[in-house]
Amino acid sequence: MRFISPVLHIRWKMLPATMVLLLCGVQIGSAAETDVRPPAVAGQFYPSDPEKLRSAIEAYLKRSATGNAGNPIAILVPHAGYVYSGQICANGYRQAMGVNYDTIVILGVNHTTGDFRGVSLGNYGALRTPLGEIPVDTNLTAALLSECKDCVQSRQVHIAEHSIEVQLPFIQVLFPKALVVPAIIHPPDYDMCVRFGKALGKVLKNRRALIVISSDLSHYPSYENASKTDHQTLDAIASLDTVRFASTMKELDVPNLATRACGEAAIIAGITAAKSLGARRAFVASYANSGDTPGGDRSRIVGYGAVVLDSGAASAQALDREIPGLSGTTPLQPAEKKMLLSLSRATILHHLSPQAPQPTVDFPARLKVRQGAFVTLRKKGELRGCIGLMASNTELSKTVGMMSLQSAFSDPRFTPVEWSELKNLEIEISVLTPMQPIASVSEIVVGRDGVLLSKAGRSAVFLPQVATENKWSRTEMLDNLCRKAGITSGCWKQGAEFQIFQADVFSESQFAGGGPGEK
């Protein structure tokens, strides 16, 4: 199955509309002759096989934290390929899971039709995905057309657009009885967005509706700069102040920042509508970027966040206030380490055989602390996969679950793990402390410190145990780190930046009485 990189969709703006349609495999004639919008990016942004698509969404949802919201009025979720942002998307939708909505209004982005101005509601009777058709709420559409002069029913802007389409499978799985209204807003003209937001809030009064704001965050800065700018963007969104958000979009400026939020218009309109419907707080449910995924280029990333808007009385929550830090956390106890190792093996096993017991989701508070981790797989002593998440923005148990799947099935250096290999696999987990910048390589202690090197838009990381296992000196470790980053040996001697971290490393072989492979 082929997925389109999240950095590709922004480039489509530069292509003629007809070329975009050819890339998406959509025939213009067939879309215009039917009342149903066919899928344009199935098999690219998400699986085209119905069973695989449903299983993927259910797996994402199982790994998501239970909701902190009551009845969400709106959620902001990303619209990149599921391999990049599917888990973040699920973390947002999970906050609304179990609520009975009649209508889902999806506020999308125009990536394909640059000359469009206004709010396009499509003019379809239904929208199709591999999971079937979702009826459009035509009564609500008519009400919006009557209430807001900016609304039109243009199909052209919808035909190849993915920002709404990628939300539909999540809606079909979670809210199978709900109707939808697709709305693409362009450009991010502040007055127009506010007008539409007020109109949307008015027509949704006394309806059981959820507003889905489809938006990615920063496009193309470095990993470090993305984290900074995305936190500022999420903070502005969580304030529920559209003027502040619009100002933030104008003020953010770091190298290679092409887009601050790929859904700026949808965010302004969505916040406006949600506030008119009673939203009094917003909190960030999840954050990551494409550099956190296997093979992700950390010199050029796309950011993803999930934000929930509800009627709670608490004040707005920004990302670094919502995500607990590690201050005061206790060391992992042996029983907690065994839980994580069991979770890792059970997650891999269940992926290979859905009939196997599902991994537990009931963990003690210590394993819900948000913390980075790597999962390393070895087969008869040889490396079989190793992928991790440096950022401490996801609960530790969920980080381990996600990284177990990535290490087993998505490490580009290896073929996916097969059932026959399980009995010979040894699982090792490295739970990370937060990264700290250092002024000189002399501060690096071999065997104690993991090291992240960044230079000229490239980066690479070694866990603390790598140097010890290879019997490297500090110089040898740094030379190898340069080569891993795709730079010549010695690159670390001038112009490089370093961050160090420590890790609590443990493996199945340390604990007796485990399951298959724990020996």
Image (cartoon, rainbow, N blue to C red):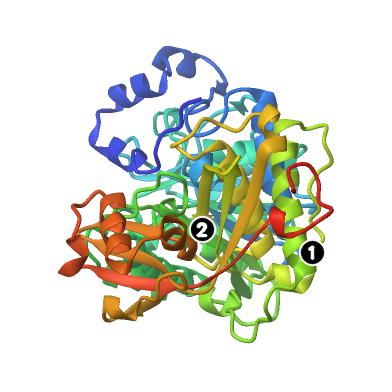
Q: Is residue 90 visible?
A: no
> x, y percentage for residue 336?
76, 67
> x, y percentage for residue 266?
46, 54
Residue under label 1, please give it: 363
Classify residue 173 as left or right of residue 476: right
Classify residue 234 as left or right of residue 168: left
Q: Is residue 188 visible?
A: yes
Q: Nearer the viewer, residue 459 or 244?
A: 459
Q: Quadrant of residue 157?
A: top left
The three-letter amino acid code for the residue at tag 1 is Phe
Classify residue 112 as left or right of residue 41: left
Residue drawn at (26%, 58%) of the image: 479
Q: Are marks 2 and 1 in contact (CB under 8 Å)?
A: no
Residue drawn at (63%, 36%) of the image: 169
The three-letter amino acid code for the residue at tag 2 is Leu
Q: From what the image shows, is residue 401 above or below residue 27?
A: below
Residue drawn at (62%, 22%) of the image: 49
Q: Secondary structure at mark 2?
A: strand
Q: Nearer the viewer, residue 322 or 120?
A: 322
Q: Secondary structure at mark 1?
A: loop
Q: Nearer the viewer, residue 251 or 85?
A: 85
Q: From what the image shows, is residue 181 above or below residue 429?
A: above
Disc sitting over residue 338 in the figure: none
Residue under label 2, please give it: 389
Q: Quadrant of residue 181?
A: top right
Label 2, residues with CA under 10 Å away: few <14, some 14-19, many ≥20: many
